[in-house]
């Protein structure tokens, strides 16, 4: 029998709802897993056993007929997302005391109202920015090799799901903070279409880019999340599974392909072979020339929006902020508003172009990361391969399955037009199982 | 001598900083004013005298050399903006208990770190949406005629400033929630460029539109705010005052001019005369045809984004939400994602066009409202004249001075290209004083 901590969300929910698995027993099993593993992984920055078990016991008293869609399902929350019964510290010394409380961020409200067991807070880089490591909190390790980073900024959420601490965790992405840790940890990571999930109560860096995301170990579990958040495309997805036979699949090496390391190059090649061998018509997708500027525009937007986003904390006590965040407020890189506006308008012009390109294919696959997770925990990696899709505001989903030169996981990203989130999941269910089976990665997570 | 409650922020600050006015005495004077007037106006939903005076006394102990830019300045906060020491209730029965606390919204953090005395929470419509009246809280009255609405959704902030309760108040605008109450109450109301002030900790309805705004009784006081929030255009404004002599001023009746009532029609005519008589070259500005669709696009965006923004509260207990907000979550108006995306892309295409049109003039003036504040407190008015500028993400500033058929204030809006906030204030200083002097409005606020 599958150990409880290895159940998928969908499997666990079936048993939690019909009462054959008690919330308390499931929570206990996950807590035991965390006790065993987290001294090495350090995915959690707040975890209160008593609080979890009290909630779990309360959930167990709800009669099966009144149980909600996520009844008793433990979910980890990135520590830049407000929770009404747990501190939120943003990995910032500014929030060591006087931590916000009594307020659920909108997505947490949705999860809690759907019966979820909000389990604890997972580690993040400082204010979910890219450059700062985990200064205030302990540095999180990759479950497949604790000498390597799990990626960031949603470091703990990615590691906790991959390491079987919880079946689902919430993250946020402004550059590549969901897709990258999903790739590094070998799990699924969905950044939804911009606006498809409310951002109220999430740390703000760049309103144009900040997006909620979800980590799971299967596409089925992302469907569970998507149902609860009522993600809906205009066109309902077919009930039969997506078939690769004759499907038009584009491989998009993206404008930063020159950055790709051997692991990602091999993964793209292998993906191509696998897809062809399953009957897909695989073609290379070269983006229009303008896409070469997208990373610069993304960066101009992050700079401009970061100036105002972090001003309040800066004025409170700038010495308690990482230099790179102080530099944003002080506009050290000398961004002009003109550059910011040109970046807004240029990206806005490309979004419908991207939608129309993506709509010509049944699937578009692109790299998630430069390569497998590097050694060292201080730096959480490069967001270059993810930023384009973030600022295009389209859904992006890391699919695991491939393997780097050191045996670490490598994923590829499935992208689609804006608000095609459900279609993306439908396609990913087929492609994901094929990649997982044939991509060559074998988990090194201690069972 | 001017009674303390009538001081502008700039006047008060000078005395608070040099110590010739104690924070406690100033706070006491404003509290006395509120005690006298608020039983009629009902601008405040949370006001704790002890808490205010404790803060004020603490501020008085800070030596003049260490006083910060807003030292001791009382500021009202719209009750959809988080404050770490006061409840935030969104005028929603969902937040009668378990109110968020211990967290300052980003703009409150900036104000507090700049020495401001966060005074209390001002009334709002439910979640700052347009249609719902003040169900949970008492209905706020217009200081010039308590039988009339002060506008909304920033009802209390507009009324409190106009009625001399505080010199500055914070609001938010998604349609016309800053500019409209400013017009109805006869004060200044600045909706800044989208992104110029962080929205973290503000209620979310429409990420594309939600923007922070400020109410004051003078442009000088908006400069005080703009300094603290580090609003900066690319080009610094000249040090000499803006002169109307030879200035190119456009009057933009906007695509909804057919909605304008007699008060607004008269105000636009009078503005034209006044500007001409001060030497301005006044011309009519007709917007390109596409702008006729902007209100539909604004509405499609509000519909699409409202679906996800209010989902959490809806799932918590939809019966505690106004029907119009339930209808947003349920997408009762049947918006498609295609419509939402077309609205995004069309508005995005028009933004640089608007910037370039506006840049051809020294000033662009457009109506703020349909007419003076209507009778009745249930409906807070029509946002048609404001929504275009909200979704263009440009700065929009209500300038008071004109008068309706019933002697109520009417303002006009000064608009400019995105990120021209400081230039707008520079121009408004000149135009504002001329409009206030010659527009015909005489305050009916009980001194």
Image: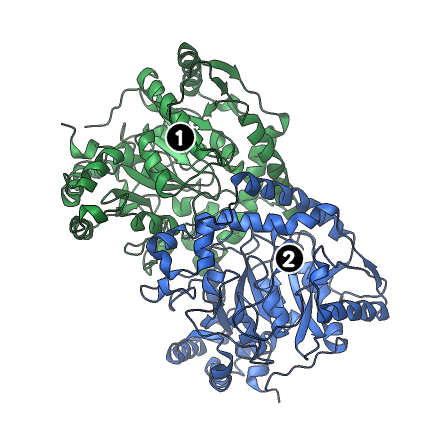
Chain colours: A green, B blue
Element on which disc 2 rests = loop
Q: Name the residue: 52% across, 22% down.
A: A361
Mark 1, residue position: A425
Say if residue A331 shows up in the picture: no
Mark 2, residue position: B395
Q: Using the image, name the chain to which the residue with label 1 belongs.
A: A
Q: Do tags 1 and 2 sit on the same chain? A: no
Q: Position of residue A405 (x, y in %)?
A: 35, 18
Q: Name the residue: 49% across, 41% down.
A: A194
Q: State the residue in front, B252 or A227.
A: A227
Q: Nearer the viewer, mark 1 or mark 2?
A: 1
Q: State the residue in front, A427 or B5.
A: A427
* Cβ atoms under marks 1 and 2 closer than 8 Å: no
Which image quadrant for residue A400?
A: top left
Left of A2 or right of it: where is A423?
Answer: right
Image position of A196 with respect to A113: above or below: above
Q: State the residue in front, B288 or B279.
A: B288
Say if residue B162 shows up in the picture: yes
Element on which disc 1 rests = helix
């Amino acid at each position: 029998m599958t150990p409880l901590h290895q159940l998928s969300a969908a499997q666990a929910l079936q048993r939690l709802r019909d009462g054959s698995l008690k919330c308390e027993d499931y929570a206990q099993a996950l807590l035991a897993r965390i006790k065993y593993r987290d001294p090495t992984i350090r995915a959690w920055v707040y975890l209160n056993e008593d609080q979890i078990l009290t909630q779990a016991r309360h959930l167990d008293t709800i009669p099966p007929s009144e149980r909600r869609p996520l009844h008793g399902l433990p979910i980890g929350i990135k520590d830049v997302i407000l929770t009404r019964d747990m501190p939120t510290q943003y990995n910032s010394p500014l929030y060591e005391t006087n931590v916000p409380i009594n307020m659920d961020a909108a997505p947490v409200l949705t999860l809690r109202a759907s019966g979820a067991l909000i389990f604890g807070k997972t580690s993040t880089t400082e204010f979910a920015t890219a450059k700062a490591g985990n200064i205030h909190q302990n540095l999180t390790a990759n479950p497949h090799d604790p000498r390597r980073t799990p990626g960031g900024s949603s470091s703990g959420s990615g590691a906790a799901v991959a390491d079987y601490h919880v079946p689902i965790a919430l993250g946020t992405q402004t550059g590549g903070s969901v897709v990258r840790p999903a790739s590094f940890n070998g799990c699924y990571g969905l950044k939804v279409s911009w606006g498809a999930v409310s951002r109220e109560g999430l740390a703000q860096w760049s309103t144009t880019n900040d997006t909620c995301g979800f980590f799971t170990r299967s596409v089925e579990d992302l469907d569970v999340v998507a149902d609860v958040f009522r993600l809906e495309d205009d066109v309902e997805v077919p009930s039969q599974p997506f078939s690769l036979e004759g499907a038009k699949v584009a491989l998009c090496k993206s404008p930063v392909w020159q950055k790709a390391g051997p692991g990602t190059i091999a993964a793209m090649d292998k993906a191509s072979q696998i897809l062809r061998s399953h009957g897909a018509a695989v073609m290379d997708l070269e983006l229009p020339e303008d896409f070469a500027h997208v990373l610069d525009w993304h960066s101009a937007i992050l700079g401009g929006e970061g100036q105002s986003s972090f001003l309040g904390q800066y004025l409170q006590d700038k010495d308690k902020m990482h230099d790179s965040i102080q530099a944003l407020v002080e506009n050290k890189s000398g961004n002009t508003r003109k550059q910011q506006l040109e970046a807004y308008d240029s990206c806005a012009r490309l979004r419908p172009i991207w939608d129309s390109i993506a709509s010509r294919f049944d699937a578009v696959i692109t790299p998630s990361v430069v390569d497998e997770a590097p050694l060292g925990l201080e730096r959480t990696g490069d967001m270059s391969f993810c930023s384009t899709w973030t600022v295009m505001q389209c859904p992006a989903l890391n699919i695991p399955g491939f393997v780097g030169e050191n045996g670490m996981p490598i994923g590829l990203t499935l992208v689609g037009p804006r608000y095609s989130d459900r279609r993306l999941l439908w396609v990913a269910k087929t492609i994901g199982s094929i990649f997982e089976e044939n991509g060559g990665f074998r988990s090194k997570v201690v069972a």
